[in-house]
Amino acid sequence: MYIPPSPCVPVDTCGAGDAYAAGILYGILRGSSNLKGMGNLAARVAAVVVGQQGTRLKEEDATELAKIFSHSLFTNNQITDMCTDIQSDQISSI
């Protein structure tokens, strides 16, 4: 399966692979079986990290990513859990 990279203007590539892996792992841990969707989420997370200085997602970026991908990857209960994760800073280390 091919997952195209998400477009971005590179600023700092440090953490790109870790961010991609975190996007995949987050989908797996949340019980998603949509591999293409998880790959797209992972590519977008990596693009956000590459487009900024530093390796940590900002809370507003994590919230935006959750909104974009929540309906294609997760059930309503999982969406609620994801929003709780973002607010509790569990996702910010992606």
Image (spheres, rainbow, N blue to C red):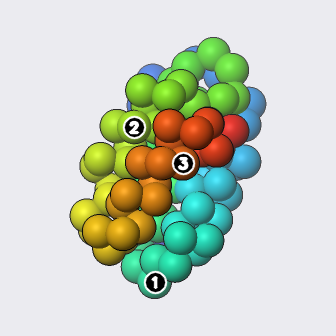
Question: Residue, x 41% and y 67% (percent of image)?
Answer: 78
Label 2, label 3: how far apart the Cα atoms are: 10 Å
Q: Which residue is mark 2?
A: 63
Task: Kindly check if marks 1 and 3 are in contact, taking CB atoms under 8 A apart as contact.
Answer: no
2 and 3 marks in contact (CB < 8 Å):
no
On residue 85, the disc is 3
Residue at 67 percent of width and 58 percent of height: 21
Q: Earlier in the sequence, mark 1 or mark 3?
A: 1
Residue at horizontal 70 percent and vertical 48 percent from the top: 17
Expressed as whole percent of the image width and height from the top left, the position of residue 45 reads 51, 44
Residue that numbered label 1 is attached to: 33
Q: Is residue 27 above or below residue 67?
A: below
| Residue at the (25%, 64%) spot, across then down | 71
- Going by the numbered disc 2, the residue's amino acid type is Thr
* Amino acid found under the numbered disc labelled 3: Asp
N-term-proximal mark, 2 vs 1: 1
Secondary structure category for the residue under label 1: loop
Between disc 2 and disc 1, the foreground one is 2
Q: Secondary structure at mark 2?
A: helix
Question: Where, by quadrant of the figure, is residue 9 drawn?
Answer: top left
- Of circles 2 and 3, which is in front? 3
